[in-house]
Image (spheres, grey):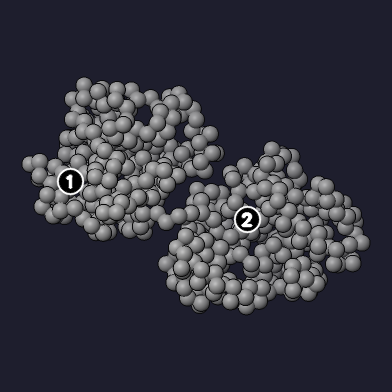
Amino acid sequence: MFDRQKADHAVDFINCLKHTKGRWRGVPFELLPWQDRIIRDVFGTVKDNGYRQYNTAYVEIPKKNGKSELAAGVALYMTCGDGEWGAEVYGCASDRQQASIVFDVAVDMVDQCPALKKRMKPVMSVKRLVYKPTNSFYQVLSAEAYTKHGLNVHAVIFDELHAQPNRELFDVMTKGSGDARTQPLFFLITTAGTDRNSVCFEQHQKAEDIIAGRKIDPSFYPVIYGASDDADWSSEKVWYEANPSLGHTIDIEKVKNAYLSAKDNPAEENIFRQLRLNQWVKQSTRWMQMEKWDDCAFPVDERELIGRECYGGLDLSSSIDITAFVLVFPPRDDVEKYAILPYFWIPEENMNLRVRRDHVPYDVWEKQGCLMTTEGNVIHYGFIENFIDELGKKFHIREIAFDRWGAVQMVQNLEGLGFTVVPFGQGFKDMSPPSKELMKLTLEKKLAHGGHPVLRWMMDNIFVRTDPAGNIKPDKEKSTEKIDGAVATVMALDRAIRNEGNNGGSVYDDRGILVF
């Protein structure tokens, strides 16, 4: 239900404020159409009892579109215009400096409004604005303050949610903190980020799902302005669609100049896409085309592979890291695909620490059965050896390739169990042919990997290094996230291809090595 009076009240309050920056300073804050729609929807949509329907608003938009001013306007309205006695309004961000940006805008807005200036007292030492008539306040918090429990929240303004180092502050501020209030509001405002395992991307996905009708949450209000991943980033039409304030608070010439600079310098392309077009990009260009990889998510049924010939790739990494073992089943005819079965292990004791540190959902994957844990705080190699031994009873594992710099003892133990273990170099000579073959099979949809989430994450993390001859290999130094499963897949695929036809021959012998 829509209450026009409540919507008008919020809009009128914010329109009485004034801009604070540059040539706009002192100009009345007349909400742009996109801002007006958000304020009216959030504050005017009510339930049967008259209270606001939406308790969370997620607004994702490129830089320079007026996010900070809008957030400051909402913060001030919730502090002194919402009719809440003793309202506690918090401005949150990744650090105190970022959290202060919206607060400083709010202070400047108060300073330019005689009615508010008379009634509001800034306490700059603690970044607090006190509204004396209702004993309410607007206070800055940062991620370092996530231990603050027991807050009686009326509103939270999260600025640049994508920059949150972890989800702890978000959880503290949004889970139960507003239960004592009749209509709390969590106003999340951000540009796109780069970390797809963050709390911001989680909210982004939820917003997309609600917009697309895949999910229903009547308390969540989603707004996303940005270009789709496959949009033409050079098109002015796309720029205007992604930036609703273009031509108002943003000069088209500045966007053009930023584009020209990004076009001439590939290193700036992702920055332009992220900040100007609001696209969730990786920090650097990855090797694997993930939409093509996702096209190969054909189902893989372990039971149907029992007794089949296969080849293993083992990447032990370090004792405290992820260990990956991947089986590749070569096709027996022209119809079948290369089937991939991956297995992963991490130490049980430090899993929760790694979830918080790496922003990676190892705990979720473990519950899904996509990742296993071994007892203790280091990888239990004996457990993995026994697991591989059991796999050898189900499948015909002809060879296991391993990094020759890996754990010698495990290799000896696997040989003792009857496996043929083959050392595999990590240089260009050994890694380039199967890496290129993996890309070729992916593009041709001749792989089946079942959409395994851990393997997908690792494939998305791959950077490659190229030598002067055009050979490539996964670059573990540049690949800051884990790629162990991808490396194990490449090694297993190599052995499968080299032994194609059961006669020791290789597709490399017949066709030569691919050159891209």
How many C-alpha atoms fall within 10 Å of the one at disc 1: few (<14), some, or many (≥20)? many
Q: Position of residue 487 (x, y in %)?
A: 32, 42
Figure disc tally: 2
Where 99 falls versus 2 (above or below)?
Answer: above
Q: Is residue 394 left or right of residue 275?
A: left
Name the residue: 78% across, 60% down.
106
Q: Is residue 191 left or right of residue 361?
A: right
Label ID, residue 497: 1
Closer to the camera, 425 or 68? 425
Q: Position of residue 279 (x, y in %)?
A: 50, 62
Where 252 falls versus 436 (above or below)?
Answer: below
Q: Position of residue 164 (x, y in %)?
A: 60, 48
Q: Which residue is mark 2?
A: 160
Name the residue: 61% across, 53% down.
161
- Quarter of the image with the N terminus is bottom right
Extreme residue in the right direction: 118
Q: Is residue 413 left or right of residue 361?
A: left
**Mark 2 or 1, nearer chain start:** 2
Residue type pointed to by label 2: Glu
> In the picture, residue 408 is in which quadrant?
top left
Name the residue: 51% across, 38% down.
355
For the residues labelled 2 and 1, say whether their Cβ atoms are less than 8 Å apart: no
Name the residue: 80% across, 72% down.
26
Q: Secondary structure at mark 1?
A: helix
The span from disc 2 to disc 1 (Cα, nearest Å) is: 48 Å
Q: Is residue 331 left or right of residue 193?
A: left
Residue type pointed to by label 1: Ile
Label ID, residue 291: none
Whether residue 144 can be seen here? yes
Q: Position of residue 314 (x, y in %)?
A: 29, 35
How many C-alpha atoms fall within 10 Å of the one at disc 2: few (<14), some, or many (≥20)? many
